[in-house]
Amino acid sequence: MSIVELYTKKSGKSFAKQVIQMYMRKQKMDTVQELLKQCPNVKEFDSKTKLLGIIRRHGYYIMNEEEYQDIIQAIKAEEDQKRKLDTDSLKKVTVGSKELVTYTDKETGEQITVDNSVSNRDVKEQMQDIQNEHQQFQSLKDNNSLNVMEYMRDKVKITPNTVASNDINMDAVNDEERQIAIVAKAFENQLGHHVDIDLNDKIIYDNGIVYTIEKRNGEYGVFLQDEVKAKKEEKGPQLVKKKNSPPKAA
């Protein structure tokens, strides 16, 4: 086969795929499986759609059964890619005995953090199980990754044990918790927005960013947790700010 013939076949096959997908959209077919129910082979496709003649007239003069199925598989592969969960956007941080996993949506920047401390399974595996078990997370239109993480947060109940800073009753906490709350509130004032606090484990959650409240040299301070950076530099938690740091509790 000459170079011209190879190019004609390749470009013609691409055109044929576009025609098939255009037909699917026009018929409001969400998946290629719906097309296969109506047109399981090229003969039925020709009979039901009358599009084979158009495809052949625009350079792809064959499109036999094998080539038709090849195009169907190419469309299916694209659909599978759209359904695929974005586990690359998961970031794991270990704080004490807690394993905190944060998903960051690439499109909106929205972040969801779950506490995976009680499970011995990776969050990626749990996300995949949820998608496999629930059809609503197999959509080609919705953000499956974000929806699965919201489900894990709201339904599986592995949300971090936190309280909003403004919901803390300072009269109902012990001395240590009061000191932690004071430092957290001061840090929140520095940020300019509310944060969530885990008083028991001394953790602050700020839109997917994890901080700890630690006592050093007799005073509590806020420290940024970055497991990757800490391992790379072989250092402990990094101070949030060296200048204008939040007030510390003795």
Image (tube, helix red, strand yellow):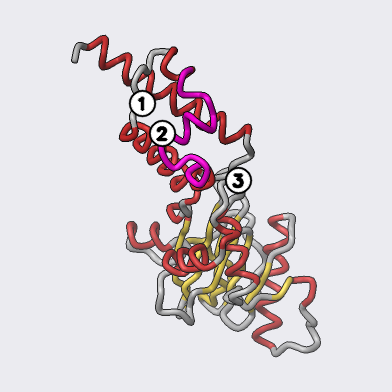
Q: Observer-nearest residue: 191 or 55? A: 55
Question: What segment is highlighted magenta in the picture?
Answer: 35-53
Q: At which x and y percent is residue 180?
A: 65, 77
What residue is shown at x 47% (from left), y 68% (from top)? 129
> What residue sits 45% from the left and 56% below the top?
87
Q: Do the residues labelled 3 and 1 touch (CB within 8 Å)?
A: no
Which residue: 59% across, 41% down? 29
**Distance in Å between CA atoms under marks 2 and 3:** 28 Å
Mark 3–mark 1 distance (CA, rounded to whole Å): 29 Å
Q: Assess whether residue 37 is covered by the magenta stretch.
A: yes
Q: What residue type is labelled 3?
A: Lys
Query: What element does badge 2 sit on?
Result: helix
- The main secondary structure of the magenta stretch is helix
Label 1, label 2: how many angstroms apart (C-alpha)?
8 Å
Find the residue positioned furthest to the left.
1
User: Secondary structure beneath disc 1?
Assistant: loop
Q: Which mark is residue 141?
A: 3
Residue that label 1 marks? 63
Mark 3: secondary structure: loop
Residue 238 to residue 66: above or below: below
Q: Given contact means CB atoms under 8 Å apart, are the residues at marks 1 and 2 in contact?
A: yes
**Residue 90 shown left or right of residue 205 in the figure:** left
